[in-house]
């Protein structure tokens, strides 16, 4: 399924990300990278298409999207940690 180079690349990339810790990872990639960026994008689309931004939707976006980002990236952290542990174990068995 995976080539050796892609496994090594995953291990190297995940080591860098896991070094920042779960809280910082979720904050950067989930809260800001997913939630806030999507809130800005959706607000910009609304502004372009309707020439106004509904404040009730803006507040909902600012709360809901970052919360979803936190939940999604927390889950992703856990799955990547399991994958990392498995690949490190397999690497030591070679």
Image: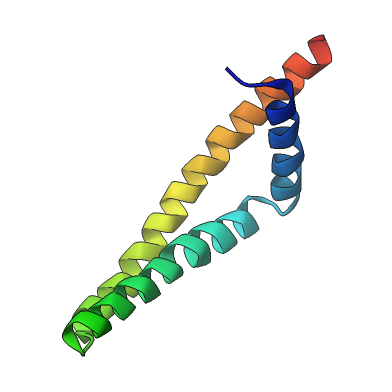
Q: Nearer the viewer, residue 50 or 61?
A: 50
Q: Position of residue 29 (x, y in %)?
A: 55, 58
- Identified at 74% across, 18% down, the residue is 89
Q: Is residue 37 above or below residue 19?
A: below
Q: Nearer the viewer, residue 68 or 37?
A: 37
Is residue 16 shown left or right of residue 44?
right
Q: Of all residues shown, which one is farthest toward the bottom?
A: 51
Q: Nearer the viewer, residue 71 or 88?
A: 88
- Identified at 23% across, 78% down, the residue is 46
Is residue 6 shown left or right of residue 71?
right
Is residue 25 shown left or right of residue 43?
right
Query: Dividing the image into 4 quarters, which one contains the N terminus?
Result: top right
Q: Position of residue 44 (x, y in %)?
A: 32, 79
Q: Position of residue 49 (x, y in %)?
A: 20, 80
Location of residue 3 by image quarter:
top right
Location of residue 94 by image quarter:
top right
- Identified at 44% across, 69% down, the residue is 37
Q: Of all residues shown, which one is farthest toward the top?
A: 94
Q: Is residue 37 above or below residue 49?
A: above
Q: Is residue 80 above or below residue 16?
A: above
Is residue 87 shown left or right of residue 30?
right
- Identified at 39% across, 61% down, the residue is 67
Q: Position of residue 74 (x, y in %)?
A: 50, 47
Q: Is residue 64 above or below residue 91?
A: below
Give the color scheme: rainbow, by chain, secondary structure or one colour.
rainbow
Q: How many marks on residues?
A: 0
């Amino acid at each position: 399924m995976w080539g050796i180079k892609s496994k090594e690349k995953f291990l190297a990339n995940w080591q860098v990300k896991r070094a920042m810790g779960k809280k910082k990872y979720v904050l950067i990639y989930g809260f800001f990278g997913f939630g806030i960026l999507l809130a800005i994008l959706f607000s910009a689309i609304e502004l372009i298409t309707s020439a106004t931004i509904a404040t009730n939707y803006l507040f909902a976006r600012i709360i809901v999207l970052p919360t979803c980002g936190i939940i999604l990236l927390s889950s992703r952290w856990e799955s990547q940690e399991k994958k990392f542990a498995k690949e490190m174990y397999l690497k030591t068995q070679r």
